[in-house]
Image (cartoon, rainbow, N blue to C red):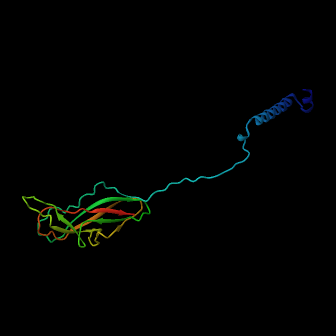
Amino acid sequence: MAGIRCCAQTRQEALQIMRNVFKLFVAAAVAAIVPAQFAAAGQVTNQFNVLINIAASCTIETSTIPDMDFGTAITPDTTNIDTTTAFDVQCTTGTSPQISLVSTLDGAERRMVGIDSGVPSGYDNTSAKIHYKLFSDSTRSTAWTNTDQVSFLDDGSLQTITVYGRVPDTGTTVGNFKDVVTVNVDF
């Protein structure tokens, strides 16, 4: 302690110097024990990408599209009989979707054919047909033929597509008539 007294003015200062020397000694000992990998000697960097691929897709959300039912008419009826059906479609953004409606044709016109065979008692209307038209607008001025495709928004939202139908003339054959229309969504 005599060597410490020569440099320190008081005993308190001497103890403080000793504590500081001890702390330095402990820090040096710990540094020698800790592996080099835990010491921050520098930094290296790299990158990775976060990716996802969203495939173009469209769905017809309506599980069963309601029938386009023109109801019961009295023949002959040459006044327009109008009705509608609708379905919901949703497409991913950027798909440019188009809908086509494909059905039985008689020349360039759509047709329903008779489906009664043997009812009532031997009556058969299966060779008869009734022409009808489909439209993409409520005024029924834009025909939706078998070759027409109607575009709709591709903003990712659920959209209701309404199909407008018209029978311009029922003809004179009684019974039930039917056609099947296939909805195609191309994207």
| Quadrant where the image shows the N terminus | top right
**In the image: residue 78, left or right of residue 61:** left
Residue 100 pos. (x, y %): 32, 66
**In the image: residue 42, left or right of residue 12:** left
Q: Residue 86 sits in which quadrant?
A: bottom left
Q: Residue at x 35, y 62 (%)?
A: 185
| Residue at the extreme left of the image, as rendered | 121
Residue 104 pos. (x, y %): 24, 66
Residue 12 pos. (x, y %): 84, 29
Residue 94 pos. (x, y %): 44, 63
Q: Residue 25 sits in which quadrant?
A: top right
| Quadrant where the image shows the C terminus | bottom left
Q: Residue at x 84, y 32 (%)?
A: 17
**Residue sitting nearer the eye, 110 or 125:** 125
**Residue sitting nearer the eye, 38 or 16:** 38
**In the image: residue 142, left or right of residue 37:** left
